[in-house]
Image: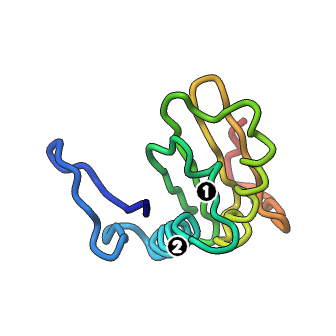
């Protein structure tokens, strides 16, 4: 079954036109399209571990839209402990293909993440606050 991008509006699920959330910035719209295309592939890699129990997705981007983070949220029974390595392998492909800085998977009691293969964290300017 194909996954679709939807939003909730007054408690009703509404499909997004062309799978894109119009108010989102360009980087997030491109990320949404890339992710849904990869997760709905039927040949080659099918991303079964990323799709299993997936309930929602959150996208975040930097102000300059150069960096984009993806969080995949999983409902019960969540991400299986026995499948963590497979999940990471699939997430790494998505991370690199869609040029995410980080892909995070969250379910009750488990948080996994992978980072873009060639990502170099920017150095904060002298006047930039650093929160840890």
51 left or right of 86? Answer: left
Quadrant of res 107: top right
Q: Position of residue 42 (x, y in %)?
A: 57, 71
Q: Residues within 10 Å of mark 2 (few under 14, many from 20)?
A: some
* Secondary structure of the residue carrying numbered label 1: strand
Quadrant where the C terminus sits is top right
Which residue bears the numbered disc 2?
A: 37
10 left or right of 87? Answer: left
Which residue is nearer to you in this view: 49 or 24? Answer: 49
Which residue is nearer to you in this view: 45 or 101? Answer: 45
Quadrant where the N terminus sits is bottom left
Separation (CA) of disc 2 from disc 1? 17 Å
- Kindly check if marks 2 and 1 are in contact, taking CB atoms under 8 A apart as contact: no
44 left or right of 23? Answer: right
**Quick check: 122 above or below 53?**
below
**Quick check: 98 above or below 95?**
below
* Secondary structure of the residue carrying numbered label 2: helix
Q: Which mark is residue 110?
A: none
Q: Position of residue 45 (x, y in %)?
A: 69, 67
| Residue at (67% x, 64% y) in the render | 94
Which residue bears the numbered disc 1?
A: 69
| Residue at (76% x, 59% y) in the render | 92
């Amino acid at each position: 079954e194909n996954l679709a991008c939807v939003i909730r509006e007054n408690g009703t699920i509404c499909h997004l036109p062309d799978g894109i959330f119009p108010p989102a910035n360009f980087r997030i719209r491109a990320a949404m399209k890339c992710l849904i295309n990869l997760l709905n592939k039927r040949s080659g890699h099918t991303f079964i571990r990323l799709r299993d129990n997936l309930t929602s997705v959150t996208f975040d981007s930097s102000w300059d839209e150069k960096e984009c983070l993806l969080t995949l949220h999983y409902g019960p029974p969540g991400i299986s402990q026995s499948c963590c390595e497979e999940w990471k392998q699939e997430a790494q492909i998505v991370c690199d293909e869609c040029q995410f800085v980080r892909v995070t998977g969250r379910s009750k009691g488990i948080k996994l993440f992978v980072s873009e293969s060639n990502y170099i964290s920017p150095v904060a300017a002298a006047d930039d606050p650093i929160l840890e």
